[in-house]
Image (cartoon, grey):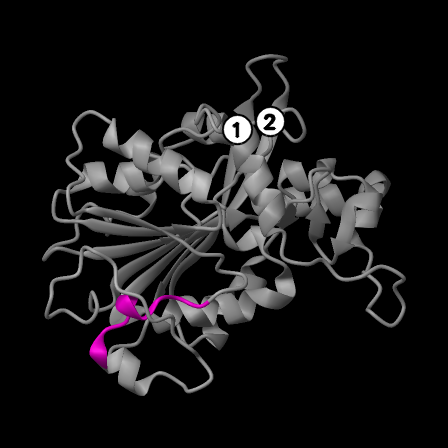
């Protein structure tokens, strides 16, 4: 998935983030909250959303096909920009040692993976996405990026994290033997495994960059739990996604609400907007320890019309407790 915004509908967040890559505290989130909640034109964003019993509409379903269609429309790869700012936000990645293994969940066209691979020759990235076309584009973009040798270092694989289970070759032996019985595993063997190698041994890092918000809220706990299951004890989960009252949320119309803080674009793709408390509860429930959690509040200017924009993202780092 890995989407920030659809061009022409809610703006181009990729460009905004490029301009904002090395600063993230231009304004206080509490000031923005007070401004939004005192403005009657935004009142529909604040009202409770009717539960299933009171609602005549079905709850949002996983929109995998909508995301596949989105990526087909933007197959040129021009929409996303390399996310070099992530290396500043998550210095653990370029500073990692001992051949670190990273799982990128919802890799899109590789705008995150390319920065990670460029940062250290000892890093190997395993990247999943629900779109086969997008994975092929990511492999093409990264293979053609100057200064990166991806031989045996970039392994994309097709998977819809909202519906499917991780392949067992991601699990280390200890994880496989102690994994809860209700978590099935896909038995398949990729070509890059050595003949006597049963799996890659688990992940040192997992990145979830603008991915979780694209999944229905009801499915998020299960998705996070599954991700944590392939993370080594002592490993880090690195998170960045939309924050409550980001300008893109305020642009959604009342009829686009499909849940509390959950919206559907005209192309069928979903977007959820997180508070710190929501992120904290989701990741704590999966057994992770909070290391960092904050709002990133950035002011930027639309280069075409000169309009000032207030962007809000949530930045988080979580630790899987050592054994």
Tell me if residue 192 is in the magenta stretch.
no
On residue 198, the disc is none
**Distance from Cα at disc 2 to Cα at disc 1:** 9 Å
Q: Position of residue 221 (x, y in %)?
A: 54, 70
Name which quarter of the figure residue 41 lies in.
top right
Q: Within 10 Å of the Cα at label 1, are there few (<14), some (14-19), or many (20+) other Cα atoms? A: some
Q: Kindly tell me whether residue 202 is visible in this rendering.
A: yes
- Nearer to us of marks 2 and 1 is 1
> Quick one: SS at disc 1?
loop
User: Which residue is located at x 27 percent, y 67 percent?
Assistant: 169
Quadrant in the picture for the C terminus: bottom left
Number of marks drawn: 2
Q: Kindly tell me whether residue 277 is visible in this rendering.
A: no
On residue 7, the disc is 2
Q: Please state which of residues 127 and 238 is positioned toward the viewer in this rendering.
A: 127
Labels 2 and 1: the sequence-earlier one:
2
> Quick one: SS at disc 2?
loop
Q: Magenta residues?
A: 165-173
Q: Is residue 246 above or below residue 176?
A: above
In the rendered view, does 34 fall on the left or right side of 102?
Answer: right
Tell me if residue 169 is in the magenta stretch.
yes
Name which quarter of the figure residue 7 lies in.
top right
Q: Are marks 2 and 1 in contact (CB under 8 Å)?
A: yes
Q: Within 10 Å of the Cα at label 2, are there few (<14), some (14-19), or many (20+) other Cα atoms? A: few
Q: Position of residue 255 (x, y in %)?
A: 84, 45
According to the picture, the residue beneath numbered tag 1 turns out to be 74
In the rendered view, does 174 fall on the left or right side of 156?
Answer: left
Q: Please state which of residues 210 and 181 is positioned toward the viewer in this rendering.
A: 181
User: Which residue is located at x 58 percent, y 51 percent?
Assistant: 64
């Amino acid at each position: 998935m890995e989407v920030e915004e659809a061009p022409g509908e809610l703006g181009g967040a990729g460009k905004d983030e490029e301009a904002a890559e090395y600063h993230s505290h231009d304004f206080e989130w509490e000031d923005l909250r007070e401004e939004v909640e005192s403005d009657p034109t935004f009142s529909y964003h604040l009202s409770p959303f009717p539960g299933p019993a009171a609602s005549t509409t079905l709850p949002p379903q996983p929109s995998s096909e909508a995301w596949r269609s989105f990526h087909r429309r933007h197959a040129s790869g021009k929409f996303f920009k390399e996310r070099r700012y992530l290396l500043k936000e998550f210095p653990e990645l370029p500073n990692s040692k001992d051949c670190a293994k990273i799982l990128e969940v919802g890799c899109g066209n590789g705008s995150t993976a390319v920065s990670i691979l460029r940062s250290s020759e000892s890093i190997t990235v395993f990247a999943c996405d629900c779109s086969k076309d997008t994975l092929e584009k990511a492999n093409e973009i990264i293979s053609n990026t100057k200064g990166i040798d991806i031989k045996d270092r970039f392994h994309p694989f097709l998977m819809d994290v909202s519906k499917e289970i991780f392949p067992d070759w991601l699990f280390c032996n200890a994880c496989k033997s102690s994994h809860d019985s209700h978590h099935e595993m896909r038995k398949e063997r990729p070509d890059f495994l050595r003949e006597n190698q049963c799996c890659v041994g688990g992940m040192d890092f997992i990145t979830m960059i603008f991915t979780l918000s694209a999944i229905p809220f009801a499915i998020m706990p299960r998705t996070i739990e599954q991700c944590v299951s392939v993370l080594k004890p002592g490993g880090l989960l690195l998170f960045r996604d939309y924050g409550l009252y980001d300008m893109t949320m305020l642009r959604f119309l009342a009829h686009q609400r499909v849940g509390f803080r959950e919206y559907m674009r005209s192309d069928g793709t979903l977007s959820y907007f997180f508070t710190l408390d929501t992120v904290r509860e989701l990741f704590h429930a999966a057994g992770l320890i909070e290391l960092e959690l904050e709002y990133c509040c950035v002011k930027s200017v639309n280069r075409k019309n000169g309009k000032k924009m207030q962007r809000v993202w949530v930045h988080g780092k979580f630790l899987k407790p050592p054994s």
